């Protein structure tokens, strides 16, 4: 029996002994999620969200839905999490990443920007914002963001690679319009 299986058995026993204890229910759901038992995790989280709505249950429901490819539902749960806890950086990052994957780049850039207002050195938000800006056709802005990422983490390979790509792209001749 592995560590997660032992933890699951302990969490299930805890839920049996104190079904009203929401921390046990939440822990149970997280372990189910970590074991990729997503349907089971969803059931526990939905019960928890119904009985005692909380941003942590909403956040994990977003993770479950995203992992199962239910992107509209994931967006709904992430948005609900942020209504409850606007300062939840991890949820905002997940939301922005999901928006990027859907091609909703302006919305994603806004979310990354909000993260960076609170945490100017959030490296992943800087890198992903740079990527979104480049995809939006704003290479100068993307370059500035990648430079900021290099200030946070000098030598970051992704920032260096993306800056090199932007420079190569900028040096290519453009066809006449």
Image: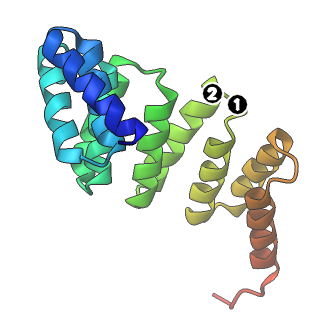
Please tell me which residue lies in front, 97 or 52: 52
Quadrant position of the N terminus in the picture: top left
Please tell me which residue lies in front, 41 or 164: 41
Residue 78 appears anywhere in the view: no
Instruction: Give the residue number, with chain letter if any, for mark 1.
Output: 120
> From the viewer's perspective, is residue 67 above or below residue 26?
below
Instruction: Give the residue number, with chain letter if any, for mark 2.
Output: 117
Instruction: Using residue 84 as the reference point, say whether residue 170 is left or right of it.
Output: right
Instruction: Using residue 135 as the reference point, say whether residue 172 is left or right of it.
Output: right
Instruction: Using residue 104 as the reference point, say whether residue 58 is left or right of it.
Output: left
**Answer yes or no: do the residues labelled 2 and 1 have beta carbons within 8 Å?**
yes
Residue 43 location (% of width, % of height) = 13, 35
Q: Residue furthest bottom?
A: 175
At mark 2, the secondary structure is helix
Q: Residue visible at 29% across and 23% down?
A: 10
User: How many residues crowd mark 1 within 10 Å: few (<14), some (14–19), many (20+)?
Assistant: some
């Amino acid at each position: 029996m592995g560590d997660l299986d032992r933890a699951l058995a302990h969490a299930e026993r805890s839920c049996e002994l104190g079904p009203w204890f929401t921390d046990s229910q939440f822990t149970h759901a997280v372990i189910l999620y970590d074991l990729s038992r997503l349907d089971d995790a969803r059931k526990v989280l939905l019960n928890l969200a119904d009985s005692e709505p909380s941003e942590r249950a909403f956040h994990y429901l977003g993770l479950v839905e995203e992992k199962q490819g239910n992107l509209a539902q994931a967006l709904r749960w992430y948005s609900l999490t942020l209504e409850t806890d606007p300062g939840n950086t991890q949820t905002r990052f997940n939301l922005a990443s999901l928006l990027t994957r859907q091609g909703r780049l302006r919305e994603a850039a806004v979310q990354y920007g909000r993260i960076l207002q609170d945490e100017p050195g959030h490296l992943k938000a800087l890198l992903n914002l740079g990527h979104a800006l480049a995809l939006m056709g704003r290479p100068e802005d993307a370059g500035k963001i990648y430079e900021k990422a290099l200030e946070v983490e000098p030598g970051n390979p992704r920032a260096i690679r993306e800056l090199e790509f932007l420079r190569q792209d900028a040096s290519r001749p453009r066809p006449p319009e």
